[in-house]
Image (cartoon, coloured by chain):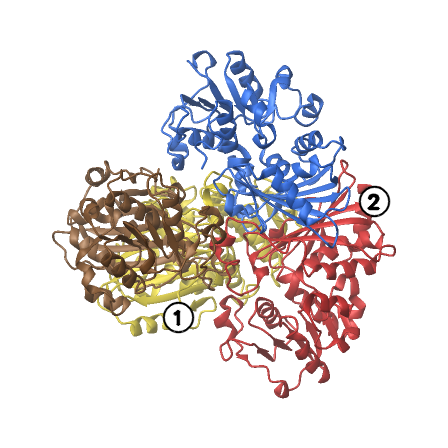
Chain colours: A red, B blue, C yellow, D brown
Amino acid sequence: MLVAGATGFAGALAAHLLWRHPRFEVARITGRSEVGRPLDAVYPRYRVPLIIEELDLDRLGELDGAVVAYPHAASAPVVAALRARGVRVCDLSADFRLRELATYERWYGPHPHPELLPEAVYGLAELHRAAIADAGLVATPGCYPTASTLALAPLARAGLIADLVIDAKQGLSGAGRGATWQTHFSNSGENILPYNIVHHRHTPEIEEQLSELDPTHPTLRVQFTPHLVPLDQGELVDCYVTPTRPVTQGELDGMYEAAYSSESFVELTSQPAEVRDVRETNFCRLHVALSEHTGKVVVLSAIDNLWKGTSSQAVQNLNLMFGMPETEGLL
Amino acid sequence: MLVAGATGFAGALAAHLLWRHPRFEVARITGRSEVGRPLDAVYPRYRVPLIIEELDLDRLGELDGAVVAYPHAASAPVVAALRARGVRVCDLSADFRLRELATYERWYGPHPHPELLPEAVYGLAELHRAAIADAGLVATPGCYPTASTLALAPLARAGLIADLVIDAKQGLSGAGRGATWQTHFSNSGENILPYNIVHHRHTPEIEEQLSELDPTHPTLRVQFTPHLVPLDQGELVDCYVTPTRPVTQGELDGMYEAAYSSESFVELTSQPAEVRDVRETNFCRLHVALSEHTGKVVVLSAIDNLWKGTSSQAVQNLNLMFGMPETEGLL
Amino acid sequence: MLVAGATGFAGALAAHLLWRHPRFEVARITGRSEVGRPLDAVYPRYRVPLIIEELDLDRLGELDGAVVAYPHAASAPVVAALRARGVRVCDLSADFRLRELATYERWYGPHPHPELLPEAVYGLAELHRAAIADAGLVATPGCYPTASTLALAPLARAGLIADLVIDAKQGLSGAGRGATWQTHFSNSGENILPYNIVHHRHTPEIEEQLSELDPTHPTLRVQFTPHLVPLDQGELVDCYVTPTRPVTQGELDGMYEAAYSSESFVELTSQPAEVRDVRETNFCRLHVALSEHTGKVVVLSAIDNLWKGTSSQAVQNLNLMFGMPETEGLL
Amino acid sequence: MLVAGATGFAGALAAHLLWRHPRFEVARITGRSEVGRPLDAVYPRYRVPLIIEELDLDRLGELDGAVVAYPHAASAPVVAALRARGVRVCDLSADFRLRELATYERWYGPHPHPELLPEAVYGLAELHRAAIADAGLVATPGCYPTASTLALAPLARAGLIADLVIDAKQGLSGAGRGATWQTHFSNSGENILPYNIVHHRHTPEIEEQLSELDPTHPTLRVQFTPHLVPLDQGELVDCYVTPTRPVTQGELDGMYEAAYSSESFVELTSQPAEVRDVRETNFCRLHVALSEHTGKVVVLSAIDNLWKGTSSQAVQNLNLMFGMPETEGLL
């Protein structure tokens, strides 16, 4: 296994999870910075002693799988090169998450390798398990779409979403490893930081996934607002759904039970979901409540943004791709 | 001036603000606990050396005004006794905030003194300035209704609110001084705590205020969800409004400018409002954005829950009640 | 395996670690509160579905080992009863940590079972590995003595400690699960809480351990000051040693290498030790520095107070007691 | 009044405090970045609407005083130019804090204006009040020396300090406004960051001040270790003193009473000093305890590192320099 881009939060955690995984072997890790240093000098807590190398596609050696953790646009060329060598890739960037090329280019600019879009499978195992198992290229979703899509899939499938507001809260690790005024403790501590209020580029990803599930509503529009709150890892997504018809709490409970009772990593809770309960795990905790007062459905979805929201979800996908138990190395 | 209930967060801060106020004199402070101790032993940072006394209504001496900071139901009898002695009262409890007795009793139980409801004025100066100046009894709103009503008043007045979701985030001081598992650092740190998901008792207060302002929509229903996030003081309220008709950003800006440009304590911001910028102040910062994507209006409202959300707003009201400049002691 | 006292922070984590341990089986868990509820309702993040029972010593069934996580004085009777039934016990309380009965009674009051003191082994594997392997009763040290003793053992053995100041910082989980004003987020957040400034009852435990190691200095007196700082799990202990004779950095490095290079859970670091790097691990990270300016030796020791400071150290001890690899279930 | 360097934490707070000061007038503020923007766009919470200008020494206009908040070495030339124009300066850098040129140059490199050292007065009003009142150049001490010197001055004057260890903890604002990995929330949150373990450049400043006070001990050496802990503003300094002779608690109390009972900004506390109680104030809280066990004296000193540790102390100095009450604008 190769981890390309192991110096960012996502790649480093993927390297850590694969390093301690009972069945994968991490052959090498690469980075665009910190080359020549062991990863455990950069991230002591992960205790991965491998040396960070420059990525040299001609000297990869025997390799059957790779995690690519580069920023969008930088990722696609690496993915393309790996695919050309027959390597099965789990990509963590936005480059292959959107089905519609036009949507990608509206938010991210020209796509470096649009020819790979058709073969990419969206890496949310709870929705696309079989396709992931066979895929050569899996596009692991971002943390907001992961939490939101899991929260809403049962309602979307039932054609129940007439109107949708998502208010998302995330810890500072979601802002990445870059040191900015935003991530400075003296700014982010004792604060709540709303950002990209009315235009966040994860919105189309959520819309695409939900619209695909919804037999009746192909042009769902999501009002999505993200916030950074003063914690490190953890994400809570509050989904406010105006249903297309009146529903009961019992009906909702049944719907979510049916969707998730056999899932290893989705927990339905009778109490409001809290991020502390999923910290450093691959679990998603969901709480579904009907408001008698407004008739709206409120779904709370809690994940660890770096784990289920990114890197442990990648391992879940790799487990599927390489024929292992889906939970291997994740419990 | 009397501060009754000075040992809770709200009463202690009110005592502090009045103690350092250039024109009010704090004659005595009372509490239901910590009697006999100086307030600065209980709250060293407030540096108010007055002794906490038991409340003895027969030995109040000469008194023209009082702040009452008791829990609901406990407050009304004290307020009634003070009113009977001709004292003008600024109450911080929920007892006199709701106009409809039935609404109060649905959420809080039997009202101890319903006969005082007609004379109570809702203590939001930006909406009820003149009435507050003449009032004998002012019911200072809670922090969620303060932030929400200021955020939405211009839209309500214009009859623009067709559907309303409010997602509120608040620091732990909002949970009060009681030590519980909820407020334990090991629970509330590195966590996000949603609570009272589909039934919070501040909802009717918001609905009553907005409905009064709205010439067209007497039965507005608010979907309101509060959260505790890991900070001490600060509250951000995200309001998601589906407008009754399409609006433009320019129209919105004009509406909010008209409503607030002459207000001393409301700040309209071009950047998303952050709670750090209002910490330990009486300011409310508002940011209004139209989503081109969904047509919804998003209003962010940031206050300090203990200041503008409670105690400094009480001082703002007292300034008005006693003929002083509204900003006295608050800038 | 029995976990008695599974509702406190220490017992719950011990139950979690043993539950996921590949070779121990947790037969039952007991508590003095929350009886009848599954542990994962009280601590959702630990995902241990066992029901919390009342402790009934007559119905324990077949049992070869137990973790006892009761407060001091409450622990000893349970330990005694278990020992009488031939169960090997890893105790987490202070009841069997001190060798001198008089010292115990000065700090904690009358000892309920002093007759067990002679058989108790101090549960710091790095110092007492062989004895732990044979012990019937292991007294797992508290978090401050663990971090301090590991930091100072090499200097103590070399007779180098002439004067010793320890300044300790710990997260709020160290204050236990009880909800108090101390642990209230509005008190402990944005604060630093020194406590028991000149008389902390972990001091004699540290003094006893170091004096035993030191061939020359039987009456070592430690100046120890603990603080709570606004984080959840993590402890840093700064030890300031005036050496009995001048030393060099090279000499110090050699001494610590010799003591710890073959230890699985002690890491010597060239950078100052940080608690984030040991969070939720059984590692202790040590950094040793000589001040050229004062001639003093500064040793920094970082552990997770709930893990290496308590519960994972108990598992390390149980591994030794039951003949398993010392790291089993802990990496 | 001019504030030069108003874009850093120290200069911005000084500008804020002087802007709201009842008797000073802030004529202009300058910065090396953000030129042309109003200060309240950079620091919204300070609400200072002045435009940040480039510093043009030839166009300062009439000016009688200035605060200079540049980094060391950058400050001295500005101070020299202002002094040449007859402006009285309160400098916040390290450039004029040390009396010994050689000591400065060992830690900071060549001094740009050593000729000004003789006229500089150390800006700790509690020790040098009269000299500050007459000074043309006041060197405001850093936060660590402020807290430490106030903590130890009574002991130093009595010749009681035989050995001294200082363990200091500070919030992230102490690391300055620069965004680095150190100040990233994902690093500094849930962490304790020791730094400059055995060589911090504030050490000689503390040693110089204490040695001057001590009639017997001219070569006092301080073992000083600073830490960053996860809060924004606040600093606690624990001083461990081995006294030159045995002392009693009563003697200590008398000594500190004598030194500080008439000081406006020093509070002696019977409980351990906490940083929350001095947040956003010019107060220093001191707690003095004798350890019966070791004979050592432990002094805890709590300040707000940005206020009494820097900017409000500058205002205290300016009050003295310009003949105003020392507390003006600071209570």
- Give the x, y percent position of residue D256: 22, 40
Residue type at mark 1?
Ser
* Label 2 close to label 1 by CB (< 8 Å): no
Query: Label 2 marks which chain's residue?
Result: A
Residue D202 makes an appearance in the image: yes
Looking at numbered disc 2 in the image, what kind of residue is underneath it? Glu
- The N terminus of chain A - image quarter: bottom right
Mark 2 crowd level (few <14, some 14–19, many ≥20, 10 Å Cα)? few
> Label 1, on which residue?
C270
Q: Residue at x 53, y 11 (%)?
A: B84
Q: Residue C158: horizontal and vertical position, in percent?
A: 28, 67
Question: Looking at this view, is B300 or D207 the one in front?
Answer: B300
Q: Note whether C222 is above or below B124 in the view shown.
A: below
Query: Looking at the image, which residue is at 65% across and 36% down?
Result: B153
Q: Nearer the viewer, residue A143 or C251?
A: A143
* Residue A25 drawn at (x, y percent): 63, 77
Q: Is residue A46 left or right of residue D78?
A: right
What residue sits right under mark 2 in the picture? Answer: A251
Q: CA distance from mark 2 to mark 1?
A: 59 Å
Task: Specify the subunit that label 1 lies on.
Answer: C
Residue visible at 46% across and 48% down in the picture: D49
Location of residue D279 (image quadrant): top left
Q: Is residue C159 rendered to the left or right of residue B192? A: left
Q: Nearer the viewer, residue A100 or B106?
A: A100
Q: What residue occupies the far left of the structure in this picture?
A: D216
Q: Secondary structure at mark 2?
A: helix
Query: Disc 1 on helix, strand or loop?
Result: loop
The picture places residue C223, in percent across and down from the top left corner, at 30, 51
